[in-house]
Amino acid sequence: YENRLEKTLGVPASNPWNALHALTATALYMQDLGAAKQTYTAERNAACRYYSGRSCDSRSPINYTYGNSVITKAENFQKDIDFLKGQ
């Protein structure tokens, strides 16, 4: 991801402990896992892939609970943003 980070950030991406670099790299990775489709299912499955390497399902060990918790947090963040914007 180093080349993509440098292209995205416009600076050398040489420090994985830099919070901006780490968060941007995570965003790029989530995009690659399918979250860029910006649908509930795509974002939930991307979270499950991030967590376990596979889409959300009920096989053992279960992973859908992680995907559900990520989506719940995202929905709560959006509610707070909408409230602050007065929507």
Image (spheres, rainbow, N blue to C red):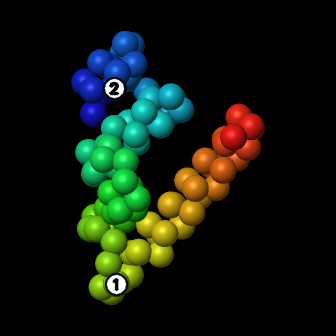
Residue extending farthest front = 87
Report the Cα–Cα distance between label 1 and label 2. 34 Å
Labels 1 and 2 touching (C-beta < 8 A): no
Query: Which one is in front, 66 or 25?
Result: 66
Occupied quadrant, residue 59: bottom left
Query: Which one is in front, 39 or 36?
Result: 39
The spot of residue 80 in percent (x, y) is 70, 47
- Badge 2: how crowded within 10 Å, few (<14), some, or many (20+)? some
Q: Is residue 19 visible?
A: yes
Occupied quadrant, residue 3: top left
The spot of residue 46 in percent (x, y) is 34, 57
Query: Which one is in front, 45 or 79?
Result: 79
Q: Please state which of the two labelled residues, at mark 1 or mark 2, is closer to the viewer.
A: 1
Amino acid at pointer 1? Ser
Q: Compared to 71, does 60 lie above or below?
A: below
Q: Is residue 46 visible?
A: no
Q: Which mark is residue 37?
A: none
Left or right of 83 in this view: 47: left
Query: Which one is in front, 72 or 14?
Result: 72
Amino acid at pointer 2? Leu
In the structure shown, which secondary structural element does the residue marked by tag 2 occupy?
helix
Q: Residue at x 51, y 61 (%)?
A: 70
Q: Residue at x 74, y 37 (%)?
A: 86
Identify the residue position indicated by label 2 in the image. 5
Q: Compared to 83, does 85 lie above or below?
A: above
Say which quadrant the C terminus sits in. top right
In the structure shown, which secondary structural element does the residue marked by tag 1 occupy?
loop
Occupied quadrant, residue 44: bottom left
Q: Residue at x 44, y 29 (%)?
A: 21
Identify the residue position indicated by label 1 in the image. 58
